[in-house]
Image: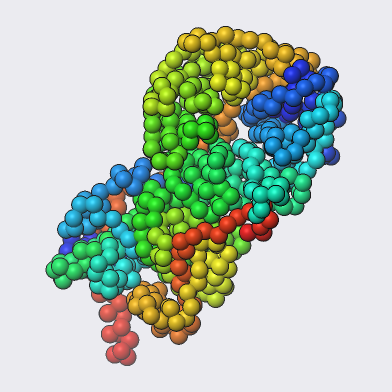
Amino acid sequence: PITAEGDYPQKKFYRSRAHCNPLSHNDTFDYPLAPSDIDWTESNYPDLAKGTVPDVLDIGCGFGGLTLALATLLPDNIILGMEIRAKVNEYVRLRVVASRKEHPGSYQNASVLRTNSMKYLPNYFSKQSTKKLFFCFPDPHFKRKNHGRRIISDRLLTEYAYILKPGGHLYCITDVKELHEWHLQKCDAHPMFRKLSDEEMSNDPCVAAMKSETEEGKKVERAGTAKYYAVYERMSEPPKVTAENFFIA
Amino acid sequence: GLNDCAFVVRDAAVCELLAPPQSDQSPSNGASMAKLPNDNNDKATKQKHETNIPNPNQIQAVAIASFSDNNQVWCAVSRYNKTLSIYRIATSETLSASISPMTVHKTVKRVLCLAFASVPSENSSSPPLHVVISGDLIGDATAHSLSDASRSRVLLGHTASMLTGLNVANHHLLTCDRDEKIRVSSFPQTFVIEGYLLGHEAFITSMDVARHFCVCVSCSGDATVRLWNYKDYQELGRFHTTRGLATRVAISPSGHHVVVLYDQSRTVDVLTTNGGTCLELLTSFECKSQPLSVKFVSDECMLVLKGEAEYMVEVKLDKKSTLFNDSRTVLAIRQVACSRNIVMPTSILETDERTGQLKLEKEAESRGAKADVLPWMKSDRIQTAKEASKRRDKRRRKNDDF
């Protein structure tokens, strides 16, 4: 293999095309039948106690910058990065192994999984089992016919509300203004999410991590363009739907 | 629905539900007399056409309901040309020979399953809102207004999948897809997912609900029929099928009996749930032509929709045996269908013409390099990278020296 286990991987051997179609049926994934079938400590978190379940998800983690930063920022949570591209996923896996070797005792709570999170989230996570979801610099899918492939959509927000605990947070950041407006529009329209105010956002250290720790974020920093972000809270009580507001809701 | 004609039957009276007007549609006429209501005659049948161009009026799904707050019977029919027609029949009047749709919705994608539902109002004195919910080819469940053709709202979606079954029961909306999942959402708060019934290993072909007992049954391409409790999300029983791919299941209102239909097999299995604890074979019966769909009318009586000559039969369950019973309803339908010479499909499942694979199965195609040679296992890449950087350094030194 190009990189031995325990060595830090070099990005140039793991470069992959940025865009992919998450809705296609061409890529076959192995996925469990139900969340209770998975033993996360088998390959993802070998040093942790049995029954450990991830509660912070970095969906579309890319080269793993945020996943590893969150591991030290939130030492009491279990972080899982999810990536659909095989090469990039392998890069992050090697990076986690190398970091664990270099800093013994740290990074035991970080790992990565190769999966299509648009299709298989309910297979991996049970009801209200996660506390935070991160969507950093997702693929904008500019063409109108590809808007259905965007990771934040009203159908998928229902699934995210299912796996998030009440009071859990959903973070999204992008450098494309149009995509940010789309995120705001979709999340505001979904009855289970409430937008956090600027003051509430500034109190959260994860927001700062999201802005500066991802590879994409650093690229945007070098280019000097703006970053747009928002944080939403998953509400505990769903609003009532009646005959009067059924078609307007 | 029989091929491209839909009928509603009351006792011995048959009324044709006409297709919405179109430029290339030939005029059709209905049949028969009129009498008293009989609500439980809804069937669905899909056609797999031998030629390449399916009939645009071919029926995809039907549904029927009557609501306690008004004296009307509502029918919904969805066709291949992406129209969803809604018909209203007053229970007090006599049945006319044929009726036109009251509302016609144009759907975004072809609708595969239908169900009626009611949304309660703010205050108990106002009437509830009645809607029809459709499940389509792209995995979306949409609610349509019964009176307004422009009012529809997408309630939920199974991403990149197809909805093969849809049921509404005690404030829950159950949807099942070809990704082996049965989703239990709240109704009418469809943006809240209550849970999933997970366990099937292949696409789910059909699902039915015994609403008074929070129990549902599903059959799938993994050769099992499973019984679930959708309040606790537990699997109650499993039955392994041996007659091929199960295409339809139905459960009796009391939850005691389950009927299973198979593709390309004229034998129908009747299972018992032993009070909701397991699924075991009770008895089977043979049909003279391919059975296509089944529905329980009462605890002991079911209607089976099948191929030519008989079109529909009524089967009574008596302890461990079955009896065929030709009631007036069955005879009326048979007479109309025979007089119109309706050709019934041989199978309810759709196949891709090019590959011959079932449309419900997911294509698995590996792209590019073979999977056994993973890109990061090819160590010769390190060598090529070393040589490339050597060449680059040499070029840089040459440019610096000039």
The answer to whether B94 is drawn above or below residue B175 in the figure is above
The answer to whether B220 is drawn above or below residue B13 in the figure is below
Residue placed farthest to the bottom in the image? B402
The answer to whether B367 is drawn above or below residue B221 in the figure is below
Tell me where residue A78 sits by quadrant.
bottom left
Front residue of A9/B82: it is: B82
Left or right placement of residue B90 versus residue A224 in this view: right
Tell me where residue A132 sits by quadrant.
bottom left
Residue A17 pos. (x, y %): 42, 63
Residue A215 pos. (x, y %): 36, 74
Front residue of A155/B332: it is: B332
Q: Residue at x 75, y 52 (%)?
A: B150
Residue A114 pos. (x, y %): 34, 55
Left or right placement of residue A139 versus residue B17 in this view: left
Q: Residue at x 18, y 69 (%)?
A: A106
Residue B256 pos. (x, y %): 47, 23
Q: How many tags in the picture?
A: 0
| Quadrant including the C terminus of chain B | bottom left
Q: Residue at x 66, y 53 (%)?
A: B123
Judge whether residue B203 can be spotted in this image.
yes
Front residue of A159/B94: it is: B94
The answer to whether A76 is drawn above or below residue B46 in the figure is below
Q: Residue at x 63, y 10 (%)?
A: B325
